[in-house]
Image (tube, grey):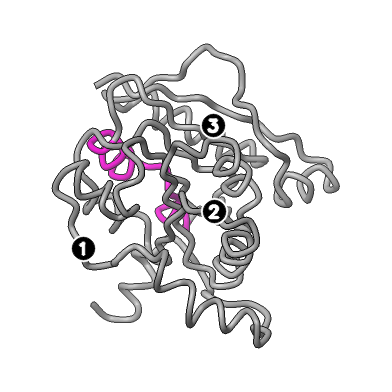
Amino acid sequence: MTQDKLREYRLFGRRQGSPLSPRQQRLIDELLPQVQVDNSAVYQDVGQLTGLFCGKFTRFHLEIGFGGAEHLIWQARRAQDVGFIGCEPFINGVVKLLTAIEEAKLENIRICDDDARDLLDRLPESSLEKAYVLFPDPWPKKRHHKRRFINQRSLNQLARVMIPGAHLCFASDIADYITWTKGHIADNQYFELANIEPMERPRTRYEEKAARAGRASTYLTIACIK
């Protein structure tokens, strides 16, 4: 794939921001390989996914684009009987999660540091109880809307790996993205908006940033109805 095609295909921009400290580099070199999802592995069934967590978990949640990892860390501490997979290609976010894993000795998190759509193709059918897409990059320019994570292709990928009745939790502070998401949900045969209270959650740094800018955040709970 050419670099131009790769940039068109992928959902994310840069992979790294500020330089890593020696401690952060150590986490990348030593801890990440222990908790990293093999980006070439195909998980044929839930048993193989359980093996990713050394056989300790049979229930799984997925967070796509965990950013600073505040929500993922909070969920992993709260539900220690669930295996969490976090997808985030931005290395500085990965380091924040690795720091929490080391300090809190969290055993129920695995990290995919690549494109979430590729992982969705490699997860087993009907294996996820819940998925989170919280404050994804809105790609505000119209010519970039094709890079938004919520689209028919990604929804169909999610539907394959989610169990019937599972919930997809979506949040954004961009009104246009909320409208976009509702439209795609209405057009998809596998999902519908659920009339339930918003999920319990911590306030992430992205939500704090939006609040400071005067933007309200909207949370959608979307049920898988396959």
Q: CA distance from mark 1 to mark 3?
A: 35 Å
Q: Classify mark 3: helix, strand or loop.
A: helix
Residue placed most toward the observer, 185 or 176? 185
Q: Residues within 10 Å of mark 1 (few under 14, many from 20)?
A: few
The amino acid type, in three-letter code, at marker 3 is: Thr
Q: Which mark is residue 156?
A: none
* Residue at 58%, 53% in the rendered image: 140
Q: Which residue is mark 3?
A: 179
Q: Would you identify the image quadrant in which residue 81 lies?
A: top left
Q: Can residue 184 be found in the magenta stretch?
A: no
Q: Can residue 151 be found in the magenta stretch?
A: yes
* Residue at 42%, 57% in the rendered image: 110
Q: Indicate the quadrant containing the N terminus: top left, top right, bottom left or bottom right.
A: bottom left
Q: Which residue is mark 2?
A: 106
Q: Classify mark 1: helix, strand or loop.
A: loop
Q: Indicate the quadrant containing the C terminus: top left, top right, bottom left or bottom right.
A: top left
